[in-house]
Image (tube, rainbow, N blue to C red):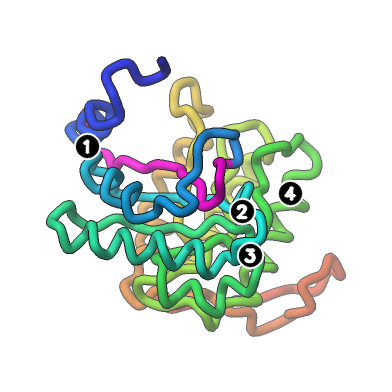
């Protein structure tokens, strides 16, 4: 009912308007939203994703039972690889298991990116969003060595434009995500977005830093206790 013309038509509309089409699916029996998941149907669903023209697949981890994350995500990765070989084009595979089950140890072998901490935005409220954002950034730093060209740590989505952060805090998050070479995932409705937030998203200098081809994540070089001690912290990154 939400997409009466079908996903393929929606995907075509998005791509014809110079955007990329992304989809959220679930590695368990259900998605986190309660819809049917892909467990034990990974190859069939991967083929469907390819036929729809999906270019970014986020794959969540709810309702997985006793099935290990590495087995579930590996099966979908294999399905997507077969789909890519079938002429459907590149599909960015994003593991969304919130940093659990040592994902940074096996994620680089089967995926293009993976989340390293729990989601920030779903139940956030003004006041605690800054603390959650900092936690996600510092948790992501601990896995810097796992990142390189073509495989990236993801500390979570950008919180810009939601009224959860002040303008200065939004600038800080965007800058930290940029030097981390993290995926710049933004899911807010652009309609009615505050001009200050939109200007941050359009910062070409920081986007260029983020898109550096070496893909090396910034690492802490000074004050690296990851606390609110007040110590000045410095980070080094390739630009």
Dot placed on the residue nearer the N-terminal end, 2 or 1: 1
Nearest the eye: 199 or 38: 38
Percent x, y of residue 202? 39, 44
* The quarter of the displayed image where residue 98 is located: bottom right
Percent x, y of residue 206? 43, 58
Magenta stretch secondary structure, dominant: loop
Choose mark 1 or mark 4, whichever is in front.
1
Q: Quadrant of the C terminus?
A: bottom left
Residue 215 in the figure: left or right of residue 89:
right
Q: CA distance from mark 2 to mark 1?
A: 32 Å
Q: Are marks 2 and 3 in contact (CB under 8 Å)?
A: no
Percent x, y of residue 114? 51, 63
Q: Residues within 10 Å of mark 3 (few under 14, many from 20)?
A: many
Percent x, y of residue 121? 65, 41
Q: Which residue is mark 2?
A: 64
Q: CA distance from mark 1 to mark 4?
A: 34 Å
Q: Which residue is mark 4?
A: 130
Q: Are marks 1 and 4 in contact (CB under 8 Å)?
A: no
Choose mark 4 or mark 2, whichever is in front.
2
Q: Which residue is mark 1?
A: 15
Q: Residues within 10 Å of mark 2 (few under 14, many from 20)?
A: some
* The quarter of the displayed image where residue 17 is located: top left
Dot placed on the residue nearer the N-terminal end, 2 or 3: 2
Choose mark 2 or mark 1, whichever is in front.
2
SS class, disc 1: helix
Q: Quadrant of the N terminus?
A: top left
The magenta-colored residue range is: 17-31
Q: Residues within 10 Å of mark 4 (few under 14, many from 20)?
A: many
SS class, disc 3: loop
The residue sitting at 80% across, 74% down in the picture is 231
């Amino acid at each position: 009912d939400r997409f009466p013309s079908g996903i393929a038509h929606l995907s075509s509309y998005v791509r014809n308007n110079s955007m990329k089409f992304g989809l959220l699916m679930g590695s368990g029996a259900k998605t986190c939203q309660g819809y049917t998941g892909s467990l034990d149907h990974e190859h069939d669903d991967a083929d469907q994703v390819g036929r729809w023209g999906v270019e970014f697949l986020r794959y969540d981890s709810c309702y997985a039972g006793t099935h290990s994350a590495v087995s579930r995500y590996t099966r979908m990765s294999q399905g997507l690889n077969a789909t890519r070989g079938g002429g459907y084009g590149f599909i960015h595979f994003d593991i969304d298991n919130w940093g659990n089950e040592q994902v940074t140890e096996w994620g680089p072998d089967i995926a293009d990116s993976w989340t390293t901490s729990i989601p920030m935005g779903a139940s956030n409220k003004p006041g605690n969003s800054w603390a959650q954002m900092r936690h996600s950034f510092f948790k992501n730093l601990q896995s810097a060595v796992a990142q390189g060209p073509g495989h990236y740590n993801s500390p979570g989505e950008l919180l810009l434009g939601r009224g959860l952060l002040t303008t200065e805090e939004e600038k800080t998050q965007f800058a930290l995500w940029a030097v981390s070479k993290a995926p710049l995932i933004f899911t807010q409705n652009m309609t009615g977005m505050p001009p200050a937030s939109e200007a941050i998203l359009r910062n070409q200098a920081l986007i260029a830093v983020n898109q550096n081809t070496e893909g090396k994540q910034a690492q802490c070089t000074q004050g690296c206790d990851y606390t609110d001690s007040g110590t000045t912290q410095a980070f080094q990154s390739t630009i």
